[in-house]
Image (cartoon, rainbow, N blue to C red):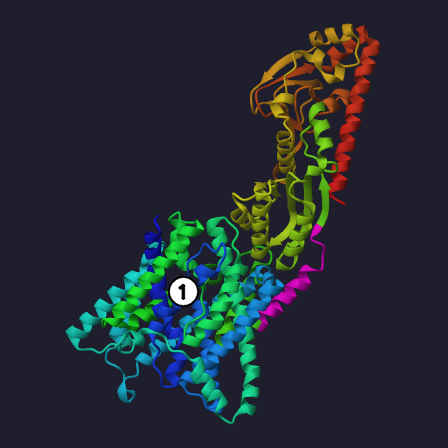
Amino acid sequence: MSPLHGGLLALGVAMPQSLALVGIAYAPLMALGMAPNPLWCLWSAIAGALLMAALTRGGAAIYGVRPSAALLYGSTLAVCATLAPSLKLGAMGVLGLTAATMMLSAAVIWLAVRTGATVFARYLPAPVGRGLGLGIGLTILWLQVRAVNDWFVGPGGRLAISTVVMVVLLALLVRLALVWKRNHPSKPYLLALLPVAAASVWVIEVATGLPFMWVSAPAVASFGDLVPPSLAANFAYELFHADHWAVVRTALTVLSAQALFVAFTFIVDSAGNAVQLEQATGRPYDVNSELRAAALAMAVLPWFGLLPVGSNFAATRPLIDGGMRDEPSLRASNATLAFGLALMLALAFVGLNRVPVLFVTAALIVIGLGMLDPVQLARPAAEPGARQMWWQTWMIGLVFLFTSGVFAMLAGFAVAVAQFVRGAEGAVVRSVYTLRELRSRRWRGNDEEAMLRQYAQRVVIVVLQGTASFAVARRIREEISRIAQPGEVDVLLVDAQRVAQWDVTALDSFARMARELRAGGVAMLLSHPSDTARKTLANIAGLFDDTDHALEWAENELLRRKGLEVAQVNRPLASAADLPLCARLSPEARASLPGFGLVTTLRAGEQAFNTGDRDSSLMALLSGSVSIEMPAMGKTLRVATFVPGMVFGEMAFLDGSARSARAVALEPSQVFYLPRERFVAWAQKHPQDGQRLLNALAAQMSQRLRFTTAQLIALNP
């Protein structure tokens, strides 16, 4: 995909979205007798595409006005409009007061970036970010419901004749946009909706004479009429030439609270946008770089009546899906987007300076619906904590809708503190091991064992417990980062068997950590992942159903990195005489032993014995591999995996009891069977060697028992 194509795709989302957001951002101006100017939103998008692309480092995103930013500006404008009579400010003075409040918000954002406080947005509990997004979406939809309700009242308070036609046409437009969005998610469906809406309204007006409402930009007589106003001088004049300083001091408290709300919500929204970009591209996103640039834009642009800007995931997603992910191409696409928006201004200059209200309303309804998480519209899942998260999200969203964003922010802080206290009650990092303390159930040859013991500290196993939420995610990450330093560790294994619940922010933290470790040459593994963890960490970390197989993979990876391939150490044995168990036998006894047994070839998946069998043979593996398994809690538990040179089945051989597990060949294998009665016959001919073999067998059983005991202690401290 070329930057030109990418810029056009981005234009298809950013331009109609910007036009639609006029009704959100500038609606309070109508109460002051000033009609909103849709050209200001276009200028905001142009400034966002150029200014943000120039100021960010490693942004790799399309920039512009997000719905949340428009709502934040609109809510600030509404607060300032309520203060206008007391402060004796006109419409332009209210815009200036809004700009001053946004400048204070920008200072808070810059300070948060400077002090590193923005990291809180990454680790807020999921209900806070989701709740604010839900509240913004519900507010946008509620504003459209109120707007449609106003259509029913015509001049003189009578029912408007065109109302039914407008509502039906609006429903059709929304339906059409949703169908296009579902069938072609990467296409500019809102841009395609504009000519459809304009043509439909024009045809109906001509055919029936019914009047429809239009959003019109002021008449443009010269190029200067396209340029947004400069508010600083007018605001300073109105503020400093009126005797209302006592009221100003009182208003500062309200405006400061609004500024904090704007800064907090903007940071959280930007962090959520960054997570979406990271999940779409698979690369880390520098949200602090974006916030620094956004703070500068927020401090400057509102003084010209323009809106705050930031990364626009809705406009970026079509480019990412089309394969464009490199920063230079995305910056070029931002330039193409700005040029396309400038052409829209040129069309306004030649007289095409209005759009139907139906299009704006339909677009806002689609935008509002797009901000509603489908998970919140369904019944809460039955997973631990899911119902609580569902209700917390709705609580914050409804507080946002029915009161104000400030109270929603306070509700979000209450949820965050509650989850922090809950998450801090127990230690999440249960224990930390290396391969010295914790090993897989795959038994190794002498060469492998020697190398694994030598480099055991290069594999770190972290066992977690409890709830992995935002409150503990950072602690987990810091603890693991402290242990797993690139260059000193080859594999990091996280055992999540005891994790009852994963918070999405914790998963985001783990995904970023896995990418950072992979860049440093450290492989990250996760055992016992939840379904959500599988989706989030797929293709980023190694995922295993159980810790045992994850440990085996880690051991094999360590051996591979140290140059010892499994094929080198698992060489087949020519006969039973070459078994390590026979190393101390006399040459005559060792040479005669194979003649007392039987060599059998097993296919992959074929059983050497099964649970309950009464066969009392001792078995030795000459080639391939055999796994000892037994059922446990509806699953198959691996007891041990043996490689050439190892013996198994010794318990039934020694005491004659029934088999307590089954032995299954993992690959084509050769097994030496030594029945108990044949061993007795051999031992009668070589009594001292028979005792030596039994002693070696007892030493092996003791070694295995010690290993099993150490594993139980490690996994259940």
- Report the quarter where the C terminus lies: top right
Image point 70% across, 24% down: which residue? 447
Residue 413 vs 509, above or below: the answer is below
Q: Is residue 408 visible?
A: no
Residue 424 in the magenta stretch? The answer is yes
Q: Main secondary structure of the magenta part?
A: helix
Q: Is residue 346 left or right of residue 107?
A: left
Q: Based on the displayed image, in which of its 4 quarters is residue 312 positioned?
A: bottom left
Nearer-the-camera pick, 285 or 536: 285
> Percent x, y for residue 536?
53, 49
Check disc 1 and give the amino acid type.
Answer: Leu
Answer with the quarter of the image where residue 565 lies. Answer: top right
> Label 1's element?
helix
Vertical placement of residue 234 versus 110, above or below: below
In the figure, is residue 271 to the left or right of 522? left
Residue in the picture at 80% in, 27% down: 702
Quadrant in the rendering for residue 353 = bottom left
Q: Is residue 398 left or right of residue 339?
A: right
| Figure label count | 1
Residue position for label 1:
369
Which region is colored magenta? 410-429
In the rendered image, residue 31, in percent from the top left (x then y), is placed at 39, 85
- Residue 368's spot in the image, x, y percent? 41, 67
